[in-house]
Image (spheres, rainbow, N blue to C red):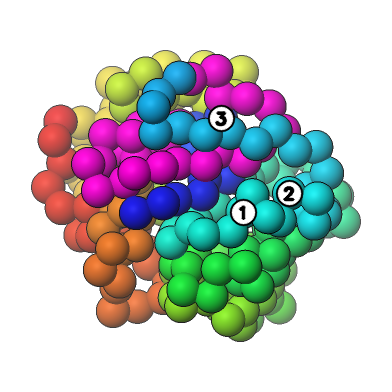
Amino acid sequence: MKVILFGATGMVGQGVLRECLLDPEVTEVLAVGRTATGQSDPKLQEIVHQDFTDFSAIADGLTGYEACFFCLGISSAGMSESDYRRVTYDFTLAAAQVLAARNPAMTFIYVSGTGTDSTARGRSMWARVKGETENALLALPFKAAYMFRPGIIQPLHGVKSKTKLYRAAYVVAAPLFPILKRLVPKHLTTSEQVGRAMLAIAKRGAPVQRLENADINAAAGAPTV
């Protein structure tokens, strides 16, 4: 299986990239981003591209893939709705439209989040925009599309957030993860499980298009740690 990965340098993307490189059924991973991953692996190819509103210049290089894992995202904290929409909706749809045209047999998986508003009419700005993005993706002519809505994600295997504040928060929260696993297992997942779930669903599909945290963990199977 040949996979395209967006957001490979982010926390979720790092975990997904790791699982892709470990999976013997994945023959190639193309990481598309505005900066290089800094990793080297025989399976890994990279395209550094600056304009995420227009992928026409690299469209030929995005052809011939069976799955796309779209992990690019940003926190809405302190952002205006227009700026948040540009990254969350505009960037995602610009890529997805090119991919759908070039790879009609592709499975597209998008990382959204718990609490996303499918009606796109609620009070929460980020939830509305995420919901609108999900709805637009599901309307594209992919073979299949799935929306991942993880809750609390525990980074594993050296995976780190690019945001300094989030890195510090995860260090503080680390001792709490075993407790959270016992108290609210349905709301907690790991970077490893997200990656494994994406691969499993890209290969075999899923019974629902919008996967909540418990669905993601079920698709991933038993955790290895």
Q: Which mark is in front, 1 or 3?
A: 1
Q: Amino acid at mark 1?
A: Leu
* Location of residue 207 in the rendering, given as x and y in whole percent from the top left corner: 28, 79
Relative to residue 181, is residue 99 depicted above or below?
A: below
Residue holding disc 3: 9
- Using residue 223 as the reference point, say whether residue 101 is left or right of it: right
Query: Which range of residues does the magenta coloring cover?
Result: 14-39
What is the C-alpha distance between the residues marked 1 and 3? Answer: 19 Å
Asked whether 145 or 87 is in front, the reply is 145
Q: Amino acid at mark 2?
A: Ile
Q: Could you say which quadrant of the image residue 89 lies in?
A: bottom right
* Location of residue 39 in the rendering, given as x and y in whole percent from the top left corner: 48, 20
Q: Could you say which quadrant of the image residue 206 lies in?
A: bottom left
- Using residue 63 as the reference point, say whether residue 67 is left or right of it: left
Q: Considering only order in the chain, which callout, 2 or 3, is on the residue closer to the N terminus?
A: 3
Label drawn at residue 58: 2
Residue holding disc 1: 62
**Is 172 a magenta residue?**
no
What is the C-alpha distance between the residues marked 3 and 2? Answer: 20 Å
